[in-house]
Image (cartoon, grey):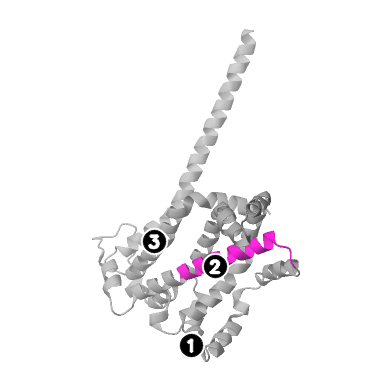
Amino acid sequence: MSSGRFTTSVGSRTISGQRRSTMILRILLAIVMLFIALFPVAWIFSASINPSNSLINQKLIPDNPTFDNYRNLLASNMFPFRAWMWNSLRLATLTTVLGVLMTAMSAYAFSRFRFRGRRSLLQTLLLIQVFPNFLNMVALFLILQQLGGYVPWLGLNTHGGLLMIYLGGVLGSNTWLAKGYFDSIPRDLDEAARMDGANDWQTFTQVLLPLVRPILVVVGLLIFIGTYSEYVLARIMLQSSEQYTLAVGLSLFIADQYANRWGVFAAGALISAFPIILFFLIFQRYLVGGLTAGSVKG
């Protein structure tokens, strides 16, 4: 009996030691990952408070730190940083709101209705996403150039034209993602709503929309981040400094001026990250559920 108890005790110690080793390994791995994730942020913040304002003299802990770079960024008349940020926020917000609305309606239609060409349209949406934007930039440029002659606010160097391009690019993959979530909701809810006298629009807005809120938050986050940080299309379609978005403005501001504007650029990069951080903090409780359910169901 004593031998059996001794064996059991040794086995328990072995398992406990393995669990402790596993926990220590996980903690070390988490520390390493946090360092990898946070070190670039710390480096950029250090650059933003470095009075030398130069990439050459960059140090993690600068001498005589100051917030002059932030004041110069917001107060300077040489580059309209506040206008660039407002342009990005406005475009990203409008694209997100309209994109989420259009994605929700199209996903609802593809999920709940059966009509001729439904399967072909779904395949077409998926096929369009295969081709990168680099292939259609010339066509989009020419379309906006011609359209501006008839509808000036949708032509080149307008936020209206760029908004149309963004909306056309966000529907494909997001519609598929939202459709998978709609498919996971039992159709019995639709039938129960119709038995209570609700039409299709009331069923969509009052019954299904509250249930698909997590996936709509995920779609909105993807659209907001993609639009807010987009550079290539904005650089081609926008041609005046007042119309630039934040990514385009900061890129042109720092071009060939790393020795003179690095600190101000770092300050601008940190300020521009706050809207995305705020978005995450507000809607974080929906993100995990929306990502997991939208990716495995449907």
Relative to 115, is 40 above or below? above
Residue marked by disc 3: 274
Closest to the observer, 101 or 223: 101
Residue marked by disc 2: 99
Residue marked by disc 1: 152
Which residue is most to the bottom? 149
Q: Residue at x 52, y 31 (%)?
A: 20
Q: Position of residue 66 (x, y in %)?
A: 25, 62
Quadrant of the image for the C terminus?
bottom right
Name the amino acid type tagged 1. Pro
| First reached walking from the N terminus: tag 1 or tag 3 | 1
- The local secondary structure at tag 1 comes to helix
Name the amino acid type tagged 3. Phe
- The local secondary structure at tag 2 comes to helix
- The local secondary structure at tag 3 comes to helix
Magenta span includes 102: yes
